[in-house]
Amino acid sequence: MRILHTADWHIGQTLNGWSREAEHRAFLADLGRILLAEQVDALLVAGDVFDGLNPSGEAQRLLYAALAGYVRANPRLQIVLTSGNHDPAQRLEAPEAVLRELGVHVLGTLSRGPGGVDLDRHLIPLRDRAGQIRAQVLALPFLRQADLPGLRLGAEEGTEGAVTAALRALLAETVARAAAIAGTLPLIAMAHLTCAGGLESAGAERRILIGGDHAVPPDVFPPALAHVALGHLHRPQSLDGGRVRYSGAPFPLSASEIGYDHGVTLLDLAGGAAPRHIPLPRPVPMLRLPAQGTAPLPEILAALDRLALPDCPRAEGPFLYLALRADRPVTEITAALDAALEALPLRLAGLTITRPETARPAAAPPQDLTRTTPEALFAAAFRDLHGTEPETRHLSAFRDALSEV
């Protein structure tokens, strides 16, 4: 029995207005090849399938065409897809009645019955190629405040916050019932949240806050669970001795993820081996200049000249993040960058400009206008805005403007 775990596709994401559709198409094609090459029996997608709550028609077509292609290539493949905090939960599961006929289970919202979580819906048997049930997966979508019964925000349960205590109680009760059904079969859980100890990525992952809490300890997942397949953190990583696993995003979604070894996770139940990370090729390069810290404009322009770039349209070129240290007015920096990038097949994904920290005297009270001049006020405002003294040409431009008033 082979299970492939992936998450955080973020279909529909853009960077500074640039579409990432080509990268998603490349990833979904690579995923299809892995499913066949590794003879995968079940595909688990642990949330954040889409990047936003209102995915475009093209984003939805991309997803459903990929799922149909996977099942067409392997009619016995089972797919379990749960929602993340980015997903439109109800829209995601709306076509489930049709998808279920293809072996695709979509869980966007948490369903409850008189006895608690509806296990007829959330506990899904996984079958091998011979049709034998080899595992059970407890598929939990992204949980919101209303999904945690007994939650009292601001309360403390012993040493735990209210959210952790409520989630622990929900999982303990639900997993106990699921384990009774699974018997001796491995029980796997899917969830979308932040576990304490996991390494977060700045710039792409929203902190999921309920009552001020954003992370729970990995031991909220009861020992009866053989494996926990998580989504939300974009770096592939394991917690709790490898039992709790983030597969990570398929490619970088922000500058902080450039160095990640993106991929998917293969779980071989028959072999009893630890989960195996399968790296994914990067569809489009993502660059940062400088690699760390900041640099002044001349160094950035020189680094741009040294780049070995593909011969392709700009809309297909690498993404570029720039981090500059201001050594001149910001308007001059942006104008020089615009000119330099105009002829290069690079897509600017982000630009930060910082000024060197300088000690400033305590602010003096505003001067009486009879004791200063408009030019002195302009110079002071220029220094505050750009961190440098105005040059002769700036003063000349100000005088010209003043003369026309």
Image (cartoon, grey):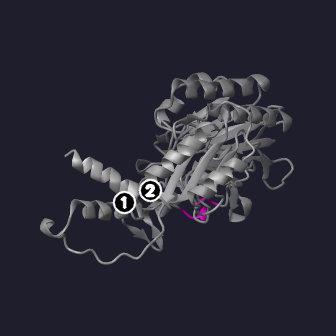
- The residue located at (84%, 53%) in the rendering is 272
Give, as a three-letter code, the residue at label 2: Pro
**Label 2 element class:** loop
Position above or below: 151 against 192: below
Position above or below: 43 against 207: above
- Residue 80 percent across, percent down from the top left: 65, 37
- Residue 110 percent across, percent down from the top left: 50, 42
22 or 329, which is in the foreground? 329
Q: Is residue 383 left or right of residue 159?
A: left
Q: Quadrant of residue 294?
A: bottom right
82 or 272, which is in the foreground? 82
Picture disc at residue 110? none
**Label 1 element class:** helix
- The residue located at (66%, 58%) in the rendering is 291
Examine the rendering and report whether any part of residue 172 can be seen: no
- Residue 32 percent across, percent down from the top left: 76, 32
73 or 250, which is in the foreground? 250
Is the Cβ of the residue at disc 1 closer than 8 Å to that at disc 2?
Answer: yes
Q: Quadrant of residue 99?
A: top right
- The residue located at (65%, 38%) in the rendering is 344
Q: Is residue 390 left or right of residue 69?
A: left
The residue to which callout 2 is attached is 329
Q: Residues within 10 Å of mark 1 (few under 14, many from 20)?
A: few
Q: Is residue 98 left or right of residue 405?
A: right
The residue to which callout 1 is attached is 385
Magenta region includes residue 142:
no
Position above or below: 1 against 272: above
Q: Which region of the structure is painted magenta?
A: 216-222
